[in-house]
Image (cartoon, helix red, strand yellow):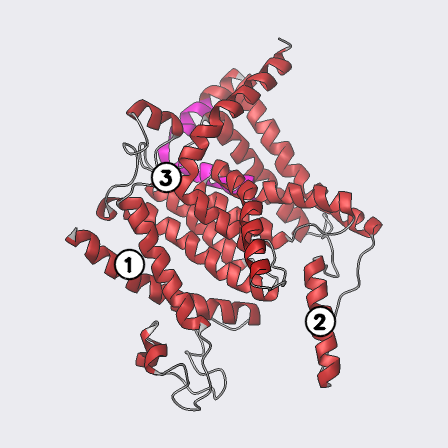
Amino acid sequence: MMTHVFFIIFLFAVGACIGSFLNVVAYRVPAGISLLYPPSRCPDCLTPLAWFDNLPVIGWILLRGKCRYCHKPISPRYPLVEFATGFLYVMYYVLFFIYHAGPAQSVHQAEIDGGWFVGQLHSLIDDWPIYALYMVLISALLAASLIDAELFIIPVGIPWTVAIIGVTGHALIDRPGLPGALVSGPVWLALGGGAAIGLILSIVLLQLKIFPISFPEGDLLEVERKELHQQAEQAAREGTDAPEIPPEYTGAQVRHELRKEMLFLMPPLFFAAGFAGLCVWVPATRHIWQNVAAITWFNALISSVLGALVGGFTVWLTRVLGSYVMGREAMGLGDVHLMLAVGAILGGGASVLTFFFAPFFGLVLALYMFAVHRRRQLPYGPYLSLAAAFVMLFYFPLAAYFQPGLLNLVTMARDMLHGT
């Protein structure tokens, strides 16, 4: 018990410090300001802050919510984010290491071992790498949600940084039997490897301008356009400069732009199917690939890449199909990047569940805002983040519940392919 108390206090302090950094990220990244320079300062009088004024939560309390120099109010969002981050770090520690929710061995391995408590996390001393990896994701989701809720954008640097950390981290720490490890069979691994090659090719062709970029003049979700119109009306009343509102695409123009995105998706899909086919139906390739897939670090790396691609593709496919049917942009590309990060750390299965649970969190938040008479719409990023935080804890029981039905679908598809 004393060990748990020590770790709880320590992790709350670490989380609060991370929360202070997330405040900096949420403020500076959208504004294009360096995270390192200039040092922390008052946004009103620009006076650099002393280290003791920057103490998470405590500094704001000691200053009574005002700048020491100009006495202008400091937003309570700063200590709230710091406290929330510390609380999340502690909550996940308690649920992971005391109640044994969260990362586990594979569904199949858990059934062999006799239940979820056998193959789950037990000690922060032994299992800190996977805990740290998950907390990187939680921190990024919080920062992205703060930015998205306020500005309706998700800076791509945040999810891509997390995706790189996730791929690298899994390659370094994953091993057989590790709870939360991403280990795939040879066929799934072939799909991931082929899709990664196709994605690199698409990016190169896009950079060479062989593939056209979609929405070159920019496009806005309906809620973003409404927000800009409200800002323009307010600017007109106050006599200030109004924000520039990009021209609205017609339904035909939206579908034309989406065909460009479909073209971008073709190489990943083609290479994934082609490479998987080689590894399944060509004996020589299958034998070589099975030996390569047995290399733990390589398997973990490609499995993390596969998870990222599954997460991103799930949202991207919904964006393309939904936008094509409705004739207007259904989801932003920022959500695609966000799910890329989720999949890189949690895996493909967890990212798919995250996407399907997100609407339920949107409904809960909508009911809350209706109850408190706040009608402001929110982008989809915060819903995806809440769903990912939930799936992070309960993925394996959920996977065990849905696994029989999914296996039946796979069996039916295989029988149809073989004509039986």
CA gap, disc 1 and disc 2: 42 Å
Q: Amino acid at mark 3?
A: Gly
| Figure quadrant of the C terminus | top right
Q: Earlier in the sequence, mark 3 or mark 1?
A: 1
Q: Amino acid at mark 1?
A: Leu
Q: Position of residue 363 (x, y in %)?
A: 58, 50
**Residue shown at 60% from the left, 66% from the top:** 151
> For this rendering, which residue is in front, 22 or 357?
357
Q: Position of residue 277 (x, y in %)?
A: 58, 23
Q: Nearer the viewer, residue 35 or 180?
A: 180
Q: Residue at x 52, y 30 (%)?
A: 190
Query: Can residue 355 be seen at all in this image of the molecule?
Result: yes
Confirm or deny contact between disc 3 and disc 2 (CB under 8 A): no
Does residue 154 appear anywhere in the picture? no
At label 2, the amino acid type is Gln
Q: Which mark is residue 230?
A: 2
- Residue drawn where x is 15% and y is 54% of the image: 2
Which tag, 3 or 2, sits closer to the chain's start? 3
Secondary element at image label 2: helix
Is the residue 77 above or below the residue 143 in the image?
Answer: below
Magenta stretch, main secondary structure class: helix
Q: For the residue carrying disc 3, how many other residues have a C-alpha within 10 Å: few (<14), some (14-19), or many (20+)?
A: many
Q: Please check the rendered image and state whether residue 225 is part of the magenta-colored stretch, yes or no.
A: no
User: Residue 295 falls in which quadrant of the image?
Assistant: top left
Magenta segment, which residues? 288-311
> Mark 3, mark 1: which one is toward the viewer?
1
Q: Position of residue 355 (x, y in %)?
A: 55, 43
Identify the residue at the far left of this view. 2
